[in-house]
């Protein structure tokens, strides 16, 4: 269930999709990956959620770690075993069962997840639903990490548009400190500006876009995503605008962490829309 290609008029708009085998082996992100059961990094190998104390294994082959040895992006996309529920020319539904001992050692909340993709001529919608159907509460902390790029135009000339938000102050490890500052709307070329920043949204509906060379890629947060991460290194020809259901490190900090009770479900969705003017 990795988004490995998104083409418009034959032009590839996803980035980091050139060597998916290497990404799979390394456990790194590419294309449009689901970050599950948490998005971005945790500040510790231990977390307490829904009354359960969890200690992660730093040598686990089912986890990926950043350069500071912090657990990053939950279980890598290549190790999540999805089952196709239904498949059509313009829609796909797949199911992930979180029931194995290996997965429960990382996130001890049995449940299942369904992802529904709907493809239309100019947009792709991704809807993710978590079902607390196995007698356990389930913390909600997942997100997505879509990498985009615009063709035949330098990164510096891409225009980023983002709504007014609250910027999260981060420590040296990239973990939110709990402090927030107002962020005015962004409508500017990237230039030499680099981003690796987290934001809290005013509500669950927000629209971001990048534009240039006649192309516009819009990322619309439709429901369930209260936070966003913008990742655009100065020296890379991509930008990631990441829908997140919780802030980075929410499993450890508990800040804004949502929980669904046994028998409940939680749905989050976002849409990618492409426009091109020749």
Image (tube, helix red, strand yellow):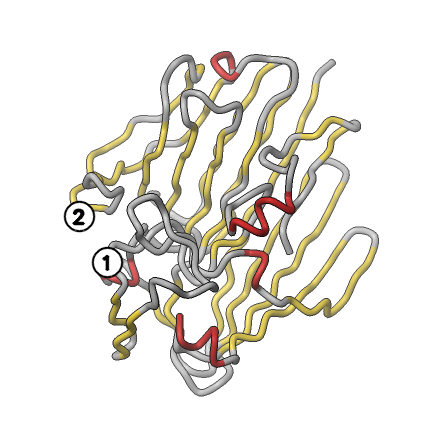
Which image quarter is the C terminus in? top right
Q: State left or right for residue 10 relative to residue 128.
A: right
Q: Position of residue 238 (x, y in %)?
A: 52, 28
- Residue ID for mark 2: 178
Which image quarter is the N terminus in? bottom right
Say if 191 sits above or below 88 in the image. above
Q: Residue furthest right?
A: 89
Q: Crowding near pointer 1: few (<14 within 10 Å), some, many (20+)?
A: some
Q: Position of residue 197 (x, y in %)?
A: 32, 35
Q: Quadrant of residue 32?
A: top right
Q: Which residue does the image show at 43% across and 60% down from the upper left? A: 63
Q: Residue furthest front?
A: 59
Q: State left or right for residue 16 relative to residue 66.
A: right
Q: State left or right for residue 182 relative to residue 259.
A: left
Please say if the residues under marks 2 and 1 sit with CB atoms less than 8 Å apart. yes
Indicate which disc residue 255 carries: 1
Q: Crowding near pointer 2: few (<14 within 10 Å), some, many (20+)?
A: few
Say if 5 sits above or below 260 in the image. above
């Amino acid at each position: 269930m990795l988004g490995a290609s998104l083409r418009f008029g034959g032009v590839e708009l996803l980035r980091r999709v050139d060597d998916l085998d290497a990404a799979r082996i390394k456990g790194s992100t590419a294309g449009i990956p689901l970050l599950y059961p948490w998005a971005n990094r945790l500040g510790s190998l231990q977390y307490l959620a829904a009354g359960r104390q969890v200690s992660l294994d730093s040598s686990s082959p089912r986890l990926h770690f950043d350069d500071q040895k912090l657990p990053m992006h939950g279980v890598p996309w290549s190790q999540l075993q999805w089952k196709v529920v239904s498949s059509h020319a313009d829609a796909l539904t797949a199911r992930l069962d979180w029931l194995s001992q290996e997965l429960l050692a990382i996130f001890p909340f049995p449940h299942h997840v369904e992802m529904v993709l709907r493809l239309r001529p100019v947009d792709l919608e991704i809807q993710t639903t978590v079902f607390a159907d196995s007698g356990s509460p389930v913390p909600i902390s997942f997100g997505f990490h879509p990498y985009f790029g615009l063709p035949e135009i330098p990164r510096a000339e891409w225009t980023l548009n983002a709504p007014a938000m609250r910027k999260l102050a981060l420590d040296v490890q990239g973990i939110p400190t709990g402090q927030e500052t107002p962020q005015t709307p962004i409508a500017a070329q990237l230039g030499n500006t680099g981003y690796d920043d987290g934001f809290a949204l005013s509500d669950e509906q927000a629209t971001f876009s990048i534009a240039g060379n006649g192309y516009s890629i819009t990322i619309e947060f439709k429901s369930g995503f209260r936070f966003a991460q913008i990742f655009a290194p100065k020296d890379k020809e991509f930008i990631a605008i990441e829908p997140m259901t919780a802030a980075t490190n929410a499993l450890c900090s508990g800040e804004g962490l949502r929980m669904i009770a046994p028998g409940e479900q939680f749905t989050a969705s976002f849409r990618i829309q492409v426009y091109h003017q020749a």
